[in-house]
Amino acid sequence: MNISRRHSLAHLLTLACTGNVFAQASAPAFPTKPVRLIVPMAAGGNGDIIARLMGQDLTAALGQPVLIDNKAGAGGNIGADAVAKSPADGYTLVLGAVGTHAINASLYRKMPYDIQRDFAPVTLMAAVPNVLVVHPALPIHSVQDLIAYGKKNPGKLNFASSGAGSSIHLSGEMFKSMTGVEMTHVAYKGSAPALTDLMAGQVQLMFDNLPTSLPHIQAGKLRALAVTSLKRSPSLPSIPTMVEAGIPGFEAGSWFGILAPAGTPKEVIALLDRDIQRSLSTPDMQRKLTERGFQPAVKGPDAFAQYIGQEIKKWDRIVKQSGATAD
């Protein structure tokens, strides 16, 4: 009887070990080939910058090349949709931003993808505050100066944006609604031409993404009045927030994170999140981001998903208040 029991136990252990070996053998390794990171924005912009910084670190961490693929157009919807319809295996990722994964849900009457249903959030990487900048020739040195000037000169202020419905445009609309200042929106095809006209004095102000304006602020070609984040930017520590400048509740800006197609294995999501967070925690990466005007703002898959839901609701209110539409 004892011998029989020992044989049975040995048989069960053999089966268990065989099962474990089989499970390990059948579990697909990741990655075994290059990973493509689609950036739904033009090359050279803020999204492209952070994607390439992270791509370099991920290439080293994963042992496979991370290839950056810029697919701009339709406010980022073209590139994001390409990822939503890609195989859910972790080999095609998207650099999500406030436009593609929050604002566009309200801005476009018909979206090619569902932001929350068609993606698996991996990691929120960084926040990008907008910065209120004016032409240095204006007799304006603070947000309160701007409000006083705007009310004394109704209709004489023009504010530039990188395009209708962008966080840059909607930040201006928020300012109008929260202060009662009359301003005319002038939409451009990107921040670069908008900044060119601002520095030439063709328009008077802009709520630009900080990384784009930072070099011009540092060179004295633009005057920064406030940042739109709740905390001051390490890149411009002497510049107050909009709240500090006297506008309670004012918060706006962009952000960037990595997402995969819905249905991507949780093990793959966890591996990518682990390596991205490791990169973001290094002093070297934090220095690179801060120098370029980004603020590290790390959230894992679950927290990132909750954040996207909150952002969709927040920007839905702002879009409706502004009356902006992309159609």
Image (cartoon, rainbow, N blue to C red):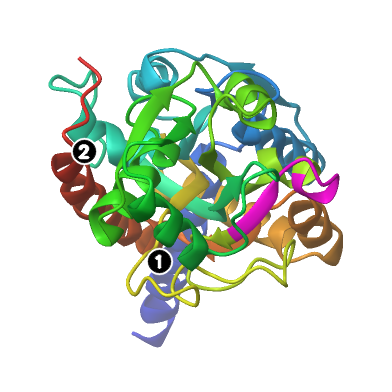
Location of mark 2 (residue): 117
Relative to 290, does residue 107 appear above or below in the rendering?
above
Q: Is residue 296 left or right of residue 83?
A: right
Location of mark 1 (residue): 12
For image coordinates 67% across by 19% down, the residue present is 43
Q: Which residues are magenta?
A: 217-225
- How far across and how far down the image is residue 158, in percent? 43, 33
Secondary structure category for the residue under label 2: loop
Relative to 261, does residue 257 appear above or below in the rendering?
below
Distance from disc 1 to disc 2, alpha carbons, whole Å, reads: 43 Å
Kindly check if marks 1 and 2 are in contact, taking CB atoms under 8 A apart as contact.
Answer: no
Graded by Cα atoms within 10 Å as few (under 14), some (14 to 19) or many (20 or more), the crowding at tag 1 reads few
Q: The C terminus is located in which quarter?
A: top left
Relative to 47, does residue 229 appear above or below in the rendering?
below
Instruction: Specify whether residue 213 is in view.
Output: yes
Q: Is residue 92 left or right of residue 104?
A: right
